[in-house]
């Protein structure tokens, strides 16, 4: 029979991160969020805990865990704040994972120890101002000039790309044309501070106000030919694999936000009184919270299954898309209902549910929009 209980190691990790989120993140994140400050001290503490190294082997400075361990950590962090959670998610699944999955031994030795320790952050340069979903329509180019790549183009909405500890960006660029005329896309590692590589000011965002998101520009930016990540012309396939894995992590983040809405609502309805009774005694409120819990539970099972298939080495594209779609819907619906339960207080930034409401929408957009997830699911069902 199926058993969805966590084993001792997973449960110990979950409890450790839950305690960290409640004791270290919750007391300070509200102020950081309103000031739109990157949480450097929190990130440093997460690095010392080994969270950035969770799914990587010890030989690279990691913790020797797996991707599901990362997902558990993301869920617990997002129960308190999604800015912190997405900083970890992007740093691991989008920053370090391409180097680990496709990098040369030299690239791994140079970058992974610092990335696993959280001393440096990596970023994932795919989306461009002219399009995100149509990643095959990239305009950023890279041409070989002797033993150097010369990169020109612009990237948009890139997480972890401009912090004081950002070390590198892995950039998707057109490096030529295939025989059928389609673009040849490759991945190239660009260290921060490389001449010709410039980072814009932070975006003014609706949510995720403690995370770092910027536009990147490359103007005759030169890096060694050895900075090619993986095979030339395989960059798009590599990025698609990275996104499939990242969607499972993103789903865990969405579940965490949805659970945080349940947590905060349960606390509030046990304290708030209206018409002489605790509002949690009213069936209308009870039904709202029951539906919130059901959505969260369903979304959690979806990402658990996707992660299990991924770890077994089985195809998991459909399951990842389902998990991402269901969890983002749960996060959006739960944050709306939690805000309604809190009434006027839900519209105040001093209460977490207002922050959750602002943060939830991006979960329906990032790592592939909800429409893209539906398209992927339909394709996996054989609908062309």
Image: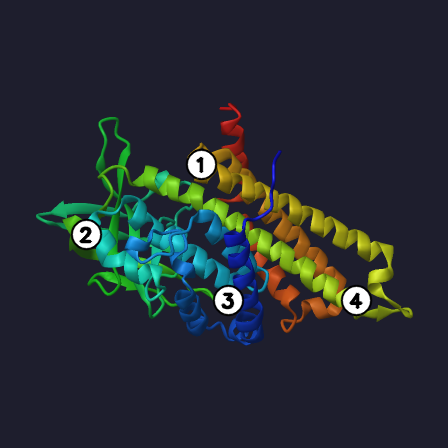
Residue placed most toward the observer, 285 or 97: 97
Among the two numbered marks 4 and 1 on one chain, the one whose residue lies closer to the N terminus: 4
Counting from the top left corner in percent of width and height, residue 226 is at 16, 49
Instruction: State how far apart marks 4 and 1 are (Cα).
Output: 43 Å
Determine which quarter of the picture holds residue 200: bottom left
Tag 2 residue: 106
- The relative height of residue 236 versus residue 64 in the rendered view (above or below) is above
Among the two numbered marks 1 and 2 on one chain, the one whose residue lies closer to the N terminus: 2
Tag 1 residue: 312
Instruction: State how far apart marks 3 and 4 are (Cα).
Output: 29 Å
Is label 1 or label 2 in front? 1
Instruction: State how far apart marks 2 and 3 are (Cα).
Output: 35 Å
Question: Is residue 175 found left or right of 300 in the rendered image?
Answer: left
Q: Residue at x 20, y 57 (%)?
A: 221
Counting from the top left corner in percent of width and height, residue 269 is at 78, 65
Is label 3 or label 1 in front? 1
- The relative height of residue 183 versus residue 117 in the rendered view (above or below) is above
Q: Work out whether residue 251 can be spotted.
A: yes
Q: Residue at x 57, y 48 (%)?
A: 6
Among the two numbered marks 3 and 4 on one chain, the one whose residue lies closer to the N terminus: 3
Is label 3 or label 4 in front? 4
Tag 4 residue: 270
Tag 3 residue: 209
Among the two numbered marks 2 and 4 on one chain, the one whose residue lies closer to the N terminus: 2
Question: Is residue 351 found left or right of 114 in the rendered image?
Answer: right
Residue placed most toward the observer, 180 or 5: 5
Q: Residue at x 74, y 60 (%)?
A: 340
- The relative height of residue 293 versus residue 207 in the rendered view (above or below) is above
Label 4 secondary element = loop
């Amino acid at each position: 029979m199926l058993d969805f209980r966590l084993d001792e190691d997973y449960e110990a990790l979950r409890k450790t991160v839950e305690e960290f989120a409640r004791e270290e993140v919750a007391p300070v994140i509200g102020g950081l969020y309103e000031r739109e400050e990157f949480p450097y001290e929190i990130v440093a503490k997460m690095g010392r805990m080994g969270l950035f190294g969770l799914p990587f082997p010890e030989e690279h400075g990691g913790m020797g865990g797996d991707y599901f361990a990362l997902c558990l950590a993301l869920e617990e962090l997002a129960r308190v704040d999604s800015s912190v959670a997405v900083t970890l998610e992007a740093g691991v699944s989008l920053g370090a994972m391409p180097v680990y999955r496709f990098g040369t031994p030299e690239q791994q030795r140079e970058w992974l120890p610092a990335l696993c320790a959280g001393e440096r952050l990596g970023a994932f340069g795919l989306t461009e101002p002219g399009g995100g979903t149509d990643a095959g329509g990239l305009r950023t180019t890279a041409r070989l000039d002797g033993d150097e790549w010369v990169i020109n183009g612009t990237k948009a909405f890139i997480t972890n790309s401009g912090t004081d500890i950002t070390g590198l960006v892995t950039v998707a660029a057109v490096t030529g044309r295939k025989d059928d005329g389609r673009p040849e896309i490759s991945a190239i590692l660009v260290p921060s501070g490389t001449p010709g590589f410039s980072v814009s000011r932070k975006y003014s965002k609706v949510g995720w106000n403690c995370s770092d998101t910027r536009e990147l520009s490359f103007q005759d930016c030169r890096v060694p030919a050895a900075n090619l990540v993986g095979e030339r012309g395989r960059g798009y396939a590599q990025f698609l694999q990275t996104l499939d894995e990242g969607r499972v992590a993103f789903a865990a983040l969405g579940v965490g936000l949805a659970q945080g809405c349940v947590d905060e609502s349960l606390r509030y309805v046990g304290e708030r009184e209206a018409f002489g009774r605790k509002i949690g005694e009213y069936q209308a409120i009870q039904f709202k919270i029951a539906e919130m819990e059901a959505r969260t539970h369903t979304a959690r099972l979806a990402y658990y299954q996707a992660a299990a298939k991924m770890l077994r080495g089985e195809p998991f594209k459909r399951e990842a898309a389902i998990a991402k779609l269901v969890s983002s819907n749960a996060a959006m619906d739960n944050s709306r209902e939690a805000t309604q339960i809190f009434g006027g207080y839900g519209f105040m930034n001093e209460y977490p549910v207002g922050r959750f409401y602002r943060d939830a929408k991006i979960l329906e957009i990032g790592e592939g929009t909800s429409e893209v997830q539906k398209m992927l699911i339909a394709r996996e069902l054989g609908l062309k």
